[in-house]
Image: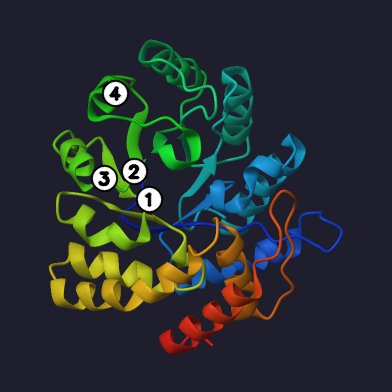
């Protein structure tokens, strides 16, 4: 069975002006997503600026989300690393904190060989009992999970899905040929959700869901329920907004968009910083046209 069906939101991590994590705002955002119908929350994904968090913060973010959710929807913890032992540590601790599943990105920068990549995932998965979602995003990591690699990694008992963010529809279709009741395919790109669903996908791990959670969840469920025209209308209506939130490197624009939507100050950690003024104006325009502000 899929860990979730619908829209899982890769949650932004709110921060204070001094750079510390704003845990109270994190709780409020988590509750808002539950109220809006988000189907799962991903804590400490790429959109959560995870690479700038020290381990204590990383784990406290996961713990805060788990406690706020309180079992109402699945919480998926991002625990990938380019250091296998570090990935093991984060994964084991996330399981102790009550996460329902793990999202494990391919080891970035190292660009492991096929054999060592398999061993990397085997090593992490052997230390936890939670289901694991592979995360393939070569544009960020330099390492692509090809269909052949996915087929090999599926042999690991607790590997139960993949977030596919290659942007390559042909590769997505090839991976979709491997999908069964024990392995779920999730879109990692907001502009390709319906194409992926059409070949057997279970949903999306979404960035735009940070500001349009209800609509994004409805889009997936409309499609899964056979309401294809309704789903298509949402997908196409979101396209200008998707273009805007990826007009600079993620998560810079989406975090600013959350701030515009919720009326909160937006802070980042270097090397990420405030978006360009033209990006802010584009966000305001597209969010207004979409009816968010």
Asked which quadrant contains residue 257, the reply is: bottom right
Pair 3/4: label in front? 3
* SS at circle 2: loop
- Asked if residue 289 can be seen in this view, the reply is yes
Instruction: Report the Cα–Cα distance between label 2 and label 1.
Output: 8 Å
Q: Position of residue 111 (x, y in %)?
A: 47, 23
Badge number at residue 95: none
Q: Which tag, 3 or 4, sits closer to the chain's start?
A: 4
Q: Tell me whether circle 1 and circle 4 mark residues in contact (CB < 8 Å).
A: no
Q: Position of residue 138 (x, y in %)?
A: 41, 37
- Residue identifier under label 2: 166
- Residue identifier under label 3: 168
Badge number at residue 188: 1
Q: Tell me: residue 3, above or below residue 143.
A: below
Q: Which tag, 1 or 3, sits closer to the chain's start?
A: 3
Q: Left of 209 or right of it: where is 156?
A: left
Q: Residues within 10 Å of mark 2 (few under 14, many from 20)?
A: many
Q: Tell me: residue 174, above or below residue 129.
A: below
């Amino acid at each position: 069975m899929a860990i979730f069906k619908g829209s899982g939101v890769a949650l932004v991590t709110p921060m204070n002006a001094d750079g510390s994590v704003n845990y109270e705002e994190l709780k409020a955002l988590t509750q808002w997503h539950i109220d809006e119908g988000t189907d799962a929350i991903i804590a400490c994904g790429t959109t959560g600026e995870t690479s700038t968090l020290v381990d204590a913060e990383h784990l406290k973010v996961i713990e805060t989300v788990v406690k706020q959710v309180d079992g109402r929807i699945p919480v998926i913890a991002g625990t990938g690393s380019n250091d296998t032992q570090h990935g093991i540590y984060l994964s084991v601790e996330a399981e102790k904190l009550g996460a329902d599943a793990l999202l494990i990105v391919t080891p970035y920068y190292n660009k492991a060989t096929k054999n060592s990549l398999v061993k990397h995932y085997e090593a992490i998965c052997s230390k936890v009992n939670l289901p694991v979602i592979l995360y393939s995003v070569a544009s960020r990591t330099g390492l692509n999970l090809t269909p052949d690699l996915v087929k090999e990694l599926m042999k690991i008992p607790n590997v139960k899905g993949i977030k596919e963010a290659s942007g390559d529809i042909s590769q997505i279709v090839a991976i979709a040929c491997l999908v069964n009741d024990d392995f779920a395919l999730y879109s990692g790109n907001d502009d390709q959700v319906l194409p992926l669903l059409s070949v057997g996908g279970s949903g999306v791990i979404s960035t735009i869901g940070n500001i349009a959670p209800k609509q994004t969840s409805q889009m997936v469920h409309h499609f899964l329920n056979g309401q294809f025209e309704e789903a298509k209308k949402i997908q196409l209506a979101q396209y200008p907004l998707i273009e805007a939130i990826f007009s600079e490197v993620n998560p810079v624009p989406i975090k600013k968009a959350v701030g515009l939507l919720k009326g909160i100050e937006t802070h980042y950690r270097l090397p990420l910083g405030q978006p360009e003024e033209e990006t802010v104006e584009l966000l305001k325009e597209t969010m207004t046209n979409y009816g968010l502000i």
